[in-house]
Image (spheres, rainbow, N blue to C red):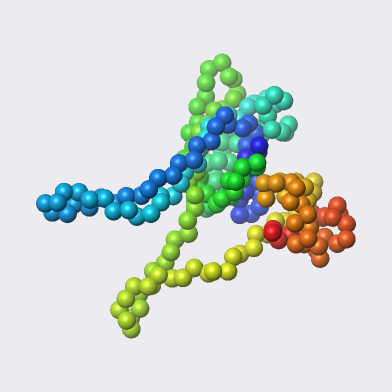
Amino acid sequence: MDIYLVESSGEKFHFPVNPEEITIQREKQLETLNILSLGEAELSQGEKVKTISFSSFFPVEYDASYCRYIELPRPHTAMNRLTTIMNRKQPVRLLISDTAINVLVNLSAHNTTIKGGEPGDVNYEVTFRTHRPLKVRSVSSSKNSIQRARPDSKPVPKVYQVKPGDSLWTIAKLELGDSSKWRAIYDKNKSVIGPDHNLIKPGQKMVMP
């Protein structure tokens, strides 16, 4: 399992050490009203935005028994990257391979803990909230009524730009969570790739199936 944050620019942040567990919280949103002498009543407002949270650490040195890759970011550099993503207030894609988690989220909180006996390592906790675009309401002057703007029903295809070292196998694992789906990517982009699926080039833009 690998955990990535993919920014709108295409830049990826790969968490170096997997957490022991990932918590996904869903709950029903309730609005409490005070109805005169009848007391309080709760009205259902639909499902709240769910949160995804986990904790792990950024190691100062590589250890093959738990690190996901060799060239580790410095712990404080990694924490600064998370702070930048949180302060930017723009959604990023949270992708956890081998799971169904591949969603737009906002990094709502992250906490840092430095423990004695672990020199250089930085422990952290992160919380993500699934991103929901705001629905704009418009006022009609002719009918004096409030209407909700209809979202575009046409799905926007997801486009991936090939980077050095990529292969259809790695792209399928990263973007679709299953490396065996490389053939679907190839069939979708055969006109761009050409007859040999191994000859993809950095800079090529591929539409995800």
Can residue 132 be seen?
yes
Residue 23 at what x, y percent from top left? 50, 37
Residue 118 left/right relative to 68: left
- State which quarter of the image contains the C terminus: bottom right
- State which quarter of the image contains the N terminus: top right
Q: List the single residue furthest toward the left.
A: 37
**Residue at 79% of width from left, 57% of height from top?**
186
**Residue at 47% of width from left, 56% of height from top?**
132
Give the number of marks.
0
Residue 85 at what x, y percent from top left? 54, 46
Near-viewer residue (35 or 150): 35
Tell me if residue 62 comes above or below residue 204 in the rendering: above
Tell me if residue 202 comes above or below residue 98 in the rendering: below
**Residue at 42% of width from left, 67% of height from top?**
136
**Residue at 67% of width from left, 50% of height from top?**
176
Residue 75 at what x, y percent from top left? 60, 31
